[in-house]
Amino acid sequence: RLAETFTTMFPLWTVLSAVLALKAPSSLAWFTTAYFTGALALLMLSMGITLTVDDFKRVLTRPAPVGMGFVLCYGMMPLLALGIAKAFALPPPLTAGLVLVGCINGGQASNLCTYIARGDVALSV
């Protein structure tokens, strides 16, 4: 019950952490890359253990949402990033960076948000 409540309050923890980082950056200086890597691994594990083989079998029976997600992630997002870069007349190096970031899916944060919203985590993964 405590873990579920803590997980459901993820948006609050995110906002509080962001405010702390903006107001007192030195207070988070201890959170180095090594800690970040460990925290990300823990988050990935926690999402993975909520899934079963049957979840993935069910997702494979619905190829349309998977295909749509793929096309939107690797088609629309880079094109949208390019459009934004052109609209703001960004120099070529920043345009390339924005398009590359546009090619990256939401990752673990989107999986966690899907879990909190009681969505289809297997489809999100």
Image (cartoon, rainbow, N blue to C red):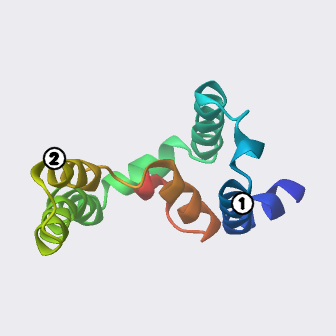
In front of the other: 1 or 73: 73
Q: Which residue is mark 2?
A: 93
Among the 4 quarters of the image, the one containing residue 85: bottom left
Q: Which residue is mark 1?
A: 23
- Outermost right residue: 2
- Labelled disc at residue 13: none
Dot 1 falls on a residue whose secondary structure is: helix
Image position, residue 116 (x, y; %): 64, 66
89 sits left or right of 107 in the view: left
Image position, residue 103 (x, y; %): 24, 51
**Residue type pointed to by label 2:** Pro
**Residue type pointed to by label 1:** Lys
In front of the other: 80 or 115: 80
Image position, residue 104 (x, y; %): 31, 49
| Mark 1 surroundings within 10 Å by alpha-carbon count, few (fewer than 14), some (14 through 19), many (20 or more) | few
Q: Is residue 2 above or below residue 87?
A: above
Q: Which callout, 1 or 2, points at the residue further toward the start of the chain?
A: 1
Separation of disc 1 and disc 2 at Cα?
A: 31 Å
Residue at 54% over, 64% down: 114
Among the 4 quarters of the image, the one containing residue 71: bottom left
Total number of numbered labels? Answer: 2
54 sits left or right of 104 in the view: right
94 sits left or right of 92 in the view: right
Dot 2 falls on a residue whose secondary structure is: helix
Image position, residue 51 (x, y; %): 57, 46
